Amino acid sequence: MARQGDEGPLVGRTGTLADVQSNLRNVGPGGTAAVFVTGESGVGKSRLLRETADALRGTGFSVLFGTCLDIGDASPLHPVLQALRRLDGSAPAGAADDAGALLERVSRDLRAIAGDQQLLLVLDDLQWADRSTRQLLLYLLAGLGDVRVSVLAAIRAEALHGTHPLRRVLAELRRLRSVRVVDLAPLSQEQTRDLVTAIVGGTVALEDADRVFKRSGGNPFVVEELSRDLRDGRVELSDTLREIFLSRVDELPPNAHTVVHAIAAGVEPVEHAVLAGVVPLPEDQLIEAVRAAVTHRFVASDRDGYKLRHRLVAEVLEQEVLPAEAASLHRRYAETLESVDGEPDNARLAFHWQRAGEPDRALTPVVASARAAERMYGFAEAHRYWTIALQLAGETDHRRTELLGHAAESAHQCGEHLLALARLEELAGRPDAPGRSELHLRRARYLASAGRSATAEIEYQRALEAPDCTPRRRASAAAYLAELLLHLGRYADANQHAREALELAAVNGATTDLVRASAALGFSAAFREDPDAGLAVIRHAVEIAERSGHPDDLGVAYLHLAELLAGPLNSIEEGVLVARRGADLLAARGVGRTYQTRLLAIAAKGLFRNGQWAEAYAVLETAMRNHPSGADAVELLLARSQLWVGFGEVDNARRDLDAVATLLAGGGARHVLPMLTLRAGLAMWQGEHAEARAAVQRGLTETRSDDLVLLGVLAWHGLRAEAEAHVAGQPTDAGALRRLRTVVDRLVKGVVDAPPAVRAVVDGYLDLCTAELSRVEDRQDPEPWARAAAIWDRRQQPYPAAYARLRHAEASLQRRVRRTSAITGLRQAYATATAMGARPFANEIVGVAQRFRVTLGDDVQVLPAGPERAADELSTLTGREREVLAAVAEGLTNREIGELLFISERTVGVHLGHIFDKLQVRTRVQASRVFLTAA
């Protein structure tokens, strides 16, 4: 029997095929790569996928091939699970232990299949992918699955309309440097002639080949069909593709005609047993009919079943079938599927009963599919099924109230908060609606997630005041309200409502409510007024959680305690110990992907602050083996990005920060401000001062956070960026400086009422801000740097202390005061930087030492600065690089240099990169200084 390989030659794709293979081999720092092939139907995407898979198989690649379903409500991860079943007949199944566990198990299976090879995951018809499959792609390509994977996927371009969810996924993935999108264009007129000639054989009249090109538009599939018509002498064809297809379908034997129509109505692949139930033919006649359909190249067959060679056939035939005829066909499909032994295929049953016009019979499999998706934590798929269920159940259906409740909650769980609110309003208007307190509480949760915090607060209050509010619900609502206020940074209000919540939870609430209320009360009290009292409350919550042993209780309690200690209170060592202990407890209870991951991220951040970067990296490597997702992954990636920036691993830092931006759908100050701060720090190490400024200014304009510590870090980076720009001879931004000074004033006023532990940390950042301003204003004052170094020494945070020593030494040597003290501080800073592995920082210290002819140590060679040294440095440049550098020294732009030297602007940039590396400089001003000194 003919298969998919029985097709025309591959014409006009040699270069594309080579590029795709090269891109798939050229993996990024995380061991991942991806090529998404887009194009119109029939342009040859699937063929390109198969050719690429065949070429790479056995050359260091292990290949998996899956196809997405065209039913709009496929089961979660269908194409990937299908590929796994094809390989060994098995796939992950059953309910998930926690949200995202299915991704972890699929990743584990993919790693096992790949072994020591690169895995090539080929996905056809990705435009029909379910939400879970799209999330898996983000998960794998962000490097979270720990799988060395190259993804090759085909996307039908005309399906990507303005609201198609895959458009957003592609936009996010384009940020990753190892991701490529290839638009597969139709064949040119000359390529069409080559394909027509190859299929027809012999000589083809030029006008015949050109006629095929005009009719097909260069679409390879249509070109092949028309070429076969030409070869077989079928000249009386219609002028449209639909007529061409219909004329060929009419030529099929009657039974084959029936088979093609049946397969076109099914969900591919259509198994033989199902087709036998749908098409009323004896077995021998059915097989003969299928064989005829394959021979006529309408149907392809493999061990999974039958599918049309091209879905355009189904689109053409769908318009030719009477509604009653189509309903009858779908009814036979549904009845056949119901008669099959084993677990029912609810997704296909729902599809066919809907199209059969049987809403009552469709509702049961739709609801079953929704519940199955929820058990697998496929909230997007569950949301889609509950939506269909609502459409199937009429306004007067007694089941509609229950369905509305599920539909509202599923919308909320998958991020459709406004839709959840709309459905909740419909639910509230029904005569058998839930009580007022439940409605207010759910509305408040949805509003808070939608970012409408003020209204959410009102709804929480209404839930508490509702006459039907039970003691248990009152405790939950109070705890949620306290948590909302804490998230908003309204620590006084959070403290007040947390006390109320704690009293209610102690009498009427569950342990979870008691722990949540205690955490909110303890954190707010410790941050704003009394660290000892706040810590006592949270430690009591930990004791309650340890007695209950419930993972949620342990996670909430340990998370808040570790975060408070390692962060605002600056009890870093104790915070790291608490985080590690909690992580061990939670790992033993099977929640490693969530709470354990976050606790290890807190531990790593604490170790970073203490200067134990190698140990922090080891902790993060352990946490990464949990393969986290969502907010847990963001926490971990931010902690690792902090290390990458410190180590000077630019590509790794960009990869992780891009992954954070991809995964972060919104988020508050806890995520956004650290991400922007790290982007600013990375940009500064690369001399990209404008990019650093933009990141900081975005942070200042996009948040209303009252977290003085986060604002202090951001303000320091902003002023440092302005100072670096000024030192490099670039203009500072007066508006940016004005906004930064406003933030500093806000910090000065806010820190007055802060508890001593919080005040000490904020004062450290204020000293750094004051010192950076002295650089901006050319005062070269070493005193602010000396104060900053002293305060960070007391806080036992070596990195900012060493940075302050560097700047203190630089200012002192510049002013030629206290040289001995300055040199001692510079050497201490260098020792700290090398011990931590902070390569960019160490290089900057070496640069300052060279500038002032300071010897850092016996093992550090610092050459004297002067004409002889500059001349030696220029000797490393090529002749062309010297020409480029001379033009830079004259103040020419890259474009002007390119015009002067008859090279492209991009080539100028490449030369400048080599010049900066050889001269060990970071800016054009520094490079010009070296050249002019030598001249």
Image (cartoon, rainbow, N blue to C red):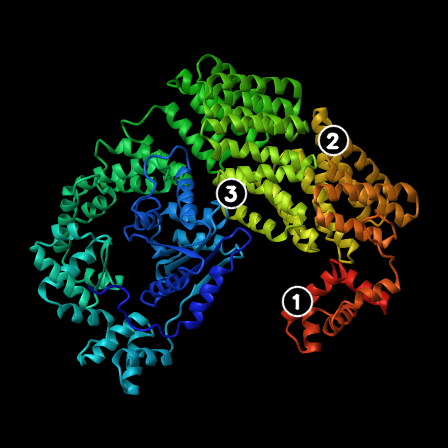
Residue type pointed to by label 3: Gly
Residue found 28% across the figure and 66% down from its top: 5
Residue found 73% across the figure and 41% down from its top: 835
Q: Residues within 10 Å of mark 1 (few under 14, many from 20)?
A: few
Q: Residue 185: image x %, image y %?
A: 40, 70
Residue type pointed to by label 2: Arg
Question: In which image quadrant can residue 206 be found?
Answer: bottom left
Could you tell me which quadrant the N terminus lies in? bottom left
**Sooner in the amino-acid sequence: mark 3 or mark 2:** 3
**Is label 3 or label 2 in front?**
2
Question: In which image quadrant can residue 418 be found?
Answer: top left
Q: Which residue is mark 2?
A: 795
Residue at mark 2 to residue at mark 1: CA–CA distance: 43 Å
Disc 3 to disc 2: CB gap under 8 Å? no
Say the numbered circle drawn on residue 477.
none
Q: Left or right? Give the position of 136 relative to 842.
A: left
Out of 362 and 571, give the one closest to the viewer.
571
Query: Looking at the picture, does residue 645 appear above or below residue 217?
Result: above
Q: Residues within 10 Å of mark 3 (few under 14, many from 20)?
A: few
Q: Left or right? Give the position of 519 relative to 775.
A: left
Q: Residue 314: image x %, image y %?
A: 22, 61
SS category of the residue bearing label 3: loop
Q: Residue 872: image x %, image y %?
A: 83, 65
Residue at mark 3 to residue at mark 2: CA–CA distance: 33 Å
Out of 139 and 287, give the one closest to the viewer.
287
Q: Which residue is mark 3?
A: 666
Q: Which residue is mark 1?
A: 910
